[in-house]
Amino acid sequence: MFYLTILIILLATKLAGDLTARLGQPAVVGKLLVGIIIGPAMLGWVENSHMIEELSEIGVLLLMFMAGLETNIEDLKRSFKSSTAVALGGIALPMLGGYLVGIAIGMDSSKAIFLGLLLSATSVSISVQSLKDLGLLKSKESTTMLGAAILDDILVVILLAFVMSMVGGEEVNLAMVIGYKFIFFVIVALFIWKIAKWVMNWLAPLRVTEAIISAGLILCFFLAYVAEQFGVAGIIGAFAAGLAISQTDYKHEVEHKLQPIAYTIFVPIFFVSVGFSVSFKGLGSQIGLLILFFVVALLTKLIGSGLGARLTGYSRRSALGIGSGMVSRGEVALIIATIGLESGLLEREYFTVLVIVVILTTLVTPLLLKATLGKQQQNQPDIEH
């Protein structure tokens, strides 16, 4: 049965991606939608499983690893001011919007604060694929989004620790949480500066098959593991690994050989698995709440992050594009929602609605990026998929 599941996923994602590309939309839109269609929500041809979840995790790590490989670290440094403004705007406005909505629907202050925190999360893994589809992954806007996503992840995790310590009934050492983040980024800096090059130079000459790509993947999974040990999302560690290898002579070979591995099986499974969390059961009575949460989630991130970009010199179109790229909440928000459910800060009646909102923000992000930045596609170099 597992083999049939993989067969269906691969065939469905390739056909759906081709169809949406022919319709002039990013291929990732079709790949995401087909996950809902063939998943438990509709046809039920494939079911989620532990194995699918693990393969999906590898897919998102490889996606962010490739994004790191294609990112110019000097551009990342130059966009630091813009990235900071985008991250802060993309946290402040969703926090405020989520809090006000929570109070308006009858939540107490602690639960409303948690709702605002959940809506502040950002996951740019889908945005990365959309930018690749549009040929914009090496653009200035893309670099700013990636930098902002890293800062967003760190700030949201710190805020989560603070909220849990204040209102979640859990003892959390905030100084230790911040210290862990600092140590992780020191490790990343060391890898970018020297360690990645040393490791690649040591492993690349090994007389085994595909030593160079194997060395790259070893670094990818190592930094993803280290990131999670220090309380940072694994995708940030994978991105950092790609960034570190991009400073070595092995960048192009790793990039060229990784794409067939990633896009043949792991990344398609990740896209389809996004839709597996969707369930339409009992949703009719909560449709008003769903629309309200979705509108708040969309507008607060779009305006907040977009305003941060606008204030740091981007044109209106580019600012809207950057705001669009930050809309997807992805797996980061799902993790926070699960924590809230377990700690009592998020009631079960809101959990399912918010999971669907997270999925909707993920689905709408490629469309927003196409509408705002798509016209720049002809001015960008072609990027191999």
Image: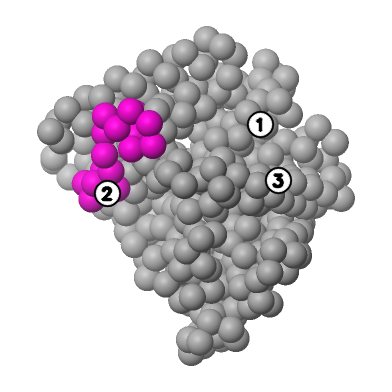
- Mark number, residue 54: 2
Q: In the rendered structure, which disc, 1 or 3, sits on the residue that comes first in sequence?
A: 3
- Residue 133 position within the rendered picture, expressed as x and y whole percent measured from the top left: 54, 24
The amino acid pointed to by label 2 is Glu
Q: Residue at x 69, y 49 (%)?
A: 292
- Judge the density around disc 2: few (<14), some (14-19), many (≥20) Cα neighbours within 10 Å: few
Compare residues 308 and 147 and report the one nearer the observer: 308
Q: Residue at x 72, y 61 (%)?
A: 101
Foreground mark, 1 or 3, reads 3
Looking at the rendering, the stretch of residues picked out in magenta corresponds to: 38-55
The amino acid pointed to by label 3 is Val
The amino acid pointed to by label 1 is Leu
Q: Which residue is mark 3?
A: 295
Q: Is 157 situated above or below 203?
A: below
Q: In the rendered structure, which disc, 3 or 2, sits on the residue that comes first in sequence?
A: 2
Q: Is residue 259 left or right of residue 309?
A: left
Residue occupying the far top of the picture = 22
- Judge the density around disc 1: few (<14), some (14-19), many (≥20) Cα neighbours within 10 Å: many
User: Is residue 238 visible to the viewer in this orientation of the structure?
Assistant: yes
Q: Which residue is mark 1?
A: 369
Is residue 44 part of the magenta span, yes or no?
Answer: yes
Q: In the picture, residue 187 is in which quadrant?
A: bottom left
Q: Residue at x 51, y 33 (%)?
A: 129
Quadrant position of the C terminus in the picture? top left
User: Is residue 197 visible to the viewer in this orientation of the structure?
Assistant: no
